[in-house]
Image (spheres, helix red, strand yellow):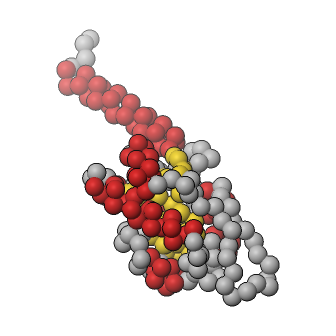
Amino acid sequence: MSTPPLAKTAIFFIAIFGFIVALFSLAVRHHDGGDNRVQFRLKDHNGETLSQDDLGGRHLLVFFGFTSCHDVCPTQMAKLTQAMAELDNSGHGNQVRPVFISVDPERDTPEKVAQFLTYFDNRFVGLTGSRMALKSAANSFKTLFADFAEQRSENYQITHSSVVFILDPFSRIVDYMPSTASAVAVAEKVREVL
């Protein structure tokens, strides 16, 4: 007894659908796994709680710093602003979001971070939180986050990493740029990984 043509077509489409589902499952497992996927749950500069999943869907340029920084942080933030302009010029700016994560939870409230961001690209998302939440985020990025003694002056500075992390839309670190990299070099590297 032969199989009717409609049944053959249905079996064919079910087999194709099964194959597609299997490939999708494999892709999701590949993207979600690995040690290079970051995780955080912090407050943004508007006071809303965000995680890495809320910023997913775009590549991220992530920089850890603090608003009272006298030198490295404003320089890096200005460089990222220039890199975003370079990406806009090549039509890639809408695929990237710059992110600033504070390493100074005692002084950097969401309001203070929001004020700091007014000097830079308006697409920046500023994040802050408790010392524990920020330490967890820094550990996820495998970056420096120093603990401090209780006694310190009002204008203390913080030692922190000055690299810029490049994340893919699945919150995985795909590369990083040293503080010595120019805005053009940052933009070129981002275009390479898009």
Quick check: can you spot residue 152?
Answer: yes
Task: Say which of 66 and 3 sits in front.
Answer: 66
Picture quadrant of residue 107 = bottom right
Relative to 107, is 77 above or below? above
The residue sitting at 55% across, 55% down in the picture is: 180
**Residue 12 to residue 173: above or below:** above
Nearer to me, 112 or 83: 83
Residue 164 lies, with reference to residue 157, above or below; the image says: above
Relative side of 160 to 2, left or right:
right
* Between 6 and 76, the one nearer to me in the picture: 76
In x, y percent, where is residue 26? Answer: 48, 37
Tell which residue pokes out farthest to the bottom in this image: 154
Q: Residue at x 47, y 58 (%)?
A: 61
- Which of the pair 102/47 is nearer the observer? 102
Residue 81 image offset from top left, x and y in percent: 40, 65
Q: Which quarter shows the C terminus? A: top left
Q: Residue at left 51%, top 46%? A: 174
